[in-house]
Amino acid sequence: MPSNLAAPLTVGLAGTGRIGTSHAETLKSLPGVGTIIVTDADTERARATADKLEVEFAPDIEAVFAAGIDGLVITTATDSHPALITAAVDRGIPVFCEKPIAADITGTLRVVEHVERSNVPVQIGFQRRFDAGYRAARAAIAAGDLGWIHTLRATTLDPAPPPAEYIPRSGGLFRDCGVHDFDIIRWVSGREVVEVYATGANRGEQFFADSGDVDTAAVVLRMDDGCLATVSLSRYNGAGYDVRLEVLGSNGNAIVGLDERAPLHSVEPGYPPSALPAYPGFMDRFHGAYVEELATFLQVVTGATTNPCPPADALEAFYIAEACELSRHQGKPVRLADIRR
C-alpha cells in the first residue's frame, strides 16, 4: 500500500450511506490523512456518521470546500455526481468519485470534457483494478505467460436483489452491475470492445420488469483482436456473492476469484465442500481493493502517482453498458462505433 504521503491531508467526503461511511472509516486508517470532513443531503445522517467516526461534520458541500480540503471523495446519488465533480475541479480540488460519472452518456461526456480542460485529476471508483487477483491476471497477459487469449469469462452474481426503490434510479443491470465487468475486461486484457450482443430475463421480483430492467443477463463481447468475452450477471445467486474472471489462452489460464470463499459447489463424488462461508457481498469480497484504491487516491492528490482510472476510462465502460442495453431491446448485436458521440 502506498504510504509516502505528505501529511496531514484534509479530505472531504460527500455522501454518508453505506459505501461513504466505509470510505470514511478507511480514510481514517490511512497514513497521511489529518482531517476528514463529511457531508450529506441528509444532514442528520451526516452528523450521526461524523459523531460515530469522530470526524468533522459540514452542513453542505460549500462548507466542505470552505474548509480548504486537499481532495474530495464523492459517494452521493448518481444525479449529484456531475455538479460535485465540476465544482471541485473548478476549485482545483482532486476528486475520487464512485461510478458512474453521470446517469447517461450525454452527461458523462459533458463532465469528461470539463475535466479534460483542466489539469485536476478525477479518479473514478472501479475498485477491481486494485484487487490482487485482477492485477495478477493483467500481468500474466502482459507478460505473454498465457499465450494468445481466445476467451474471457466474467461473472458478477449478487446473492440477493437490492431494494425495490433502488432499481428505477440504478440505471439498469448493465450500467449498475455489468459496468464493473466491462471495465475490468478492458483493463485486464488491454483490448477494446468493438461489438456486443446482450440478452436478459426476469425470473424474480416484478419490480425489475416494472422499471424496464432485468434481473439476469448474458453478454457476448467481441474484442478488437478477435478475442471473445462473456459476462454473466444476476441479482439472484442464492449460493453467495460470486465475482470471477477466467482468462483462457493458448498456453494457459488465469482465474480471478477462485478461492475458498467462492460460492461454487462441486457435485463430483468425493470432492469436499469449502469449510469457509461464501462472501456475503461486494464490501467483503473487495475490502482490500477499496483500501488500496483510496490509498492510491491520496497519492494522486499529492502528485506522487498518476491517475489510475480517469473519467475517459469510465466513459468507455459506459459505452459498452449502453450498447448492451440497446442490444437487449433490439435483439441483435450492436457495434460500439455506432453509439459513440
Image (cartoon, rainbow, N blue to C red):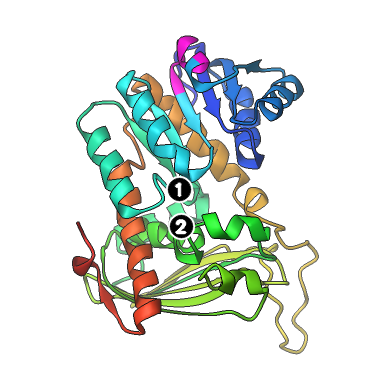
Query: Which label is found at residue 126?
Result: 1
Instruction: Report which quarter residue 89 is drawn in.
Output: top left
Q: Residue at x 30, y 63 (%)?
A: 144
Q: On screen, 95 above or below 253?
A: above
- Mark toward the start of the polypeptide (1 vs 2): 1
Q: Is residue 341 left or right of residue 142?
A: left
Q: Residue at x 37, y 21 (%)?
A: 93
Instruction: Report which quarter residue 273 is drawn in.
Output: bottom right
The answer to the question of whether label 1 and label 2 lie on touching residues, with beta carbons closer than 8 A, is yes
Q: Is residue 38 left or right of residue 307?
A: right
Image coordinates of residue 36 in percent, x first then y, are 58, 18
Image coordinates of residue 234 in percent, x first then y, are 58, 71
Q: Secondary structure at mark 1?
A: loop
Query: Which amino acid does the dot numbered 1 rest on?
Result: Phe
Judge whether residue 73 can be spotted in this image: yes
Q: Residue at x 31, y 71 (%)?
A: 147
Residue 65 is covered by the magenta coloring = yes
Q: Is residue 234 left or right of residue 205?
A: left
Quadrant of the rendering where the C terminus is positioned:
bottom left
Dot 2 alpha-carbon crowd within 10 angstroms: few under 14, some 14 to 19, many 20 or more: many
Judge whether residue 313 can be spotted in this image: no
Image coordinates of residue 44 in percent, x first then y, are 71, 26
Query: Which amino acid does the dot numbered 2 rest on?
Result: His
Q: Residue at x 44, y 31 (%)?
A: 297
Q: On screen, 112 above or below 184?
A: above
Q: Secondary structure at mark 2?
A: helix
Dot 1 alpha-carbon crowd within 10 angstroms: few under 14, some 14 to 19, many 20 or more: many
Q: Which residues are magenta?
A: 63-71
Residue 165 is covered by the magenta coloring = no
| Residue at mark 2 | 180
